[in-house]
Amino acid sequence: MSGLTLFQKLWDAHVVHVEDDGTTLLYIDRHLVHEVTSPQAFEGLKLANRTPRRADAAVAVPDHNVPTTDRSQGITDPVSRLQVETLDANCAEYGITEFKMGDIRQGIVHVIGPEAGLTLPGMTVVCGDSHTSTHGAFGALAFGIGTSEVEHVLATQCLWQKPSKTMLVKVEGELGRGITAKDIALAIIGKIGTAGGTGYALEFGGSAIRALTMEGRMTLCNMAIEAGARAGMVATDATTIEYVKGRPYAPKGAAWEQAVAWWGTLHSDADAVFDRVVELDAATIEPQVTWGTSPEMVTTINGRVPNPADAPSDIKKQDWTRALEYMGLQGNTPIAEISVDKVFIGSCTNSRIEDIREAAIVAKGRKVASSVKLAMVVPGSGLVKQQAEAEGLDKIFIEAGFEWREPGCSMCLAMNADRLEPGERCASTSNRNFEGRQGQGGRTHLVSPAMAAAAACAGHFVDVRKL
Amino acid sequence: MNKFTVLNGLVVPLDRANVDTDAIIPKQFLKSIKRAGFGPNLFDEWRYLDHGEPGKPNQGRPLNPDFVLNQPRYQNASVLLARENFGCGSSREHAPWALEDYGFRAIIAPSFADIFYNNCFKNGILPIVLDAVVVDRLFKACETIEGYVLTVDLDKQTVTTPSGEAIRFEVDGGRKHRLLNGLDDIGLTLLQGDKINAYEARRRQEAPWLFGGPRQ
């Protein structure tokens, strides 16, 4: 018999009950909650006279609607304010821990979970948010759910699931200078497509992945959903354990020893068999820039916008034509000739301290180009902001002409006041370049934090390796 | 949840691949704390020529005449015909809420994104996967024939065309049972209470750090 994949080990450890057809009741260890996808779940719970089974397994934070500018007046938009107040009220009523606006620990749900030690290796982690795949970076089984399932987890601490197929994405070799986890993620999506991972749990492995920091692994797993996979994961190793150690909610003392002993087994066995294996050579990955309205519409900084006439099929030709029309681009335009109006450095993909440092290295001693209307840096949490300020990174950005903001989801999805106006073009470190994602009519190009900072200073996309 | 048994529905073709949930229901409408009322803002940015906001009346907003849902022949459609990877992106259940509120009960596509597919079943919507070649044929038929109606029979797992051709589709047995009977998932899960208790008791021994959780 062949060995087990990491996915199978995590799955097996959480099986409560299996139906005859293989549908499994899976136990959920950690439930992260935010204001947008939870109000209807709490309402459903109330209407059915139910209460949370384990309030201690849940943690809540407002992130999508919070302002990133001065917060002394609270949230001015009454609709946004009501949603955040509803979260506050629900958490108070049911005894769920909440990192409220104003708490230094408040931030993007996928940043604060790992930061506080609420995300641990071996856990099942869910949240009413597709980017929950982020937490798989710890050797956890983490995936996004809808609001009905948020209610289901609150009521039962379980979910009905069927096992996913497994895919190993193996990245061997050494990354070139200036190449980041974001570039790996976009290169993978470019290779397998936005539906390439549908039905699969992805495991990222190989020497280039093992060499990544936890921040890099989180960026990579975060984008698994952009390849269609609900879950992405990386085996637990010394890097993981080093990151977790000493975090506020990480186990301590004897429990720590007991935990580490189990965590040491959280990797795919050498003879494990995956349903699919995809390989990439790290050395060939270049800085990535998306040109269209789906993350798979991606090329390198030295590439060109494709010509729809060269599309491999009629459907693709139609997609590319529509995308170029929306993006206001002509086929064959060199990526480096595309100028930007705004720059956004932030989101659950790229707002951790390492991301902020990488952008600051580029911003240092440079100025935001006069043609750029707005360049903003939005740290992922109050603690990331505090750390960056302790390192003087805020001053580097402010001197260069960037705005230094309060933590939240911000212009990744533009639910708060941070958004693109129709026709504006943005270099963004977020995860989705969908039509209207950053504001109706807005045009998004996904890049790494260093590439975004470089575009801000040059006024157009530029190869960060040549600066 | 509404039961789904047999549906005779007018079909509307949405000829785009990778339709994401941001397009199905744009983010500003996610500020609502209610489950109902999203239908008028379904596909808001494609459907209207102006910018929609929650609370803004939709009556009288300028419609985009080129968008398929606005064409007179497709009014009151309840079957949405779509292309591959429908419902990709955000996990927002507001997407099936909006589709259901508008009047859609079935969606046919060559493939769906996982989270969206799952969310549909929780809201009385049947997502049907058919071969891309068959879907392409249905696109041509419903664009050619005005008033094109399909009959979806969940129990028999068939989509039947006006000419009487019955096309078989696959659906997971558990999901089918729950949708046919309009059953509440949580109620079913609570029947497994003893097993959940037993699991928790064992895990408290094996992995005590997973219990107790954050304290304020």
Image (tube, coloured by chain):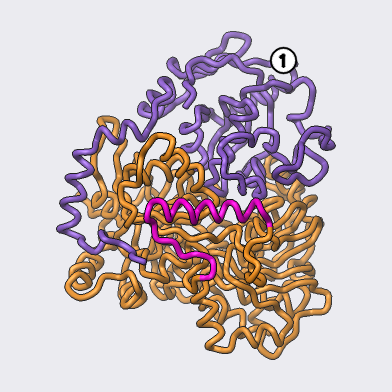
Chain colours: A orange, B purple
Q: Position of residue A12 (x, y in %)?
A: 24, 49
**Vertical placement of residue A153 versus A177, above or below:** above
Q: Is residue A133 visible?
A: yes
Determine the image quadrant of residue A272. bottom left
Image coordinates of residue A245 in percent, x first then y, are 31, 76
Q: Is residue A407 rendered to the left or right of residue B52?
A: left
Q: Position of residue B151 (x, y in %)?
A: 57, 14
Q: Could you tell me which residue is drawn at 83 percent across and 79 percent down?
A: A370
Q: Amino acid at mark 1?
A: Gly
Disc 1 secondary structure class: loop
Q: What kind of secondary structure does the magenta stretch mostly adopt?
A: helix
Query: Where is residue A282 shown, x and y percent of the image?
Result: 49, 70
Q: Which residue is mark 1?
A: B147
Against A453, residue A34 (above or below) is above
What span is in magenta?
Answer: A77-102
- The residue sitting at 39% across, 64% down in the picture is A205
Above or below, A52 relative to B80 = below
| Residue A110 among magenta residues | no
Q: Residues within 10 Å of mark 1 (few under 14, many from 20)?
A: some
Q: Quadrant of the C terminus of chain A?
A: bottom right
- Which residue occupies the foreground of this view, A70 or A351? A70
Name the residue located 64 percent from the left edge and 59 percent from the top edge: A298
The residue sitting at the top extreme is B164
Residue at screen point 25% across, 37% down: A18
Image side of residue A246 versus residue A214, left or right: left
State whether residue A19 is above or below residue A362: above
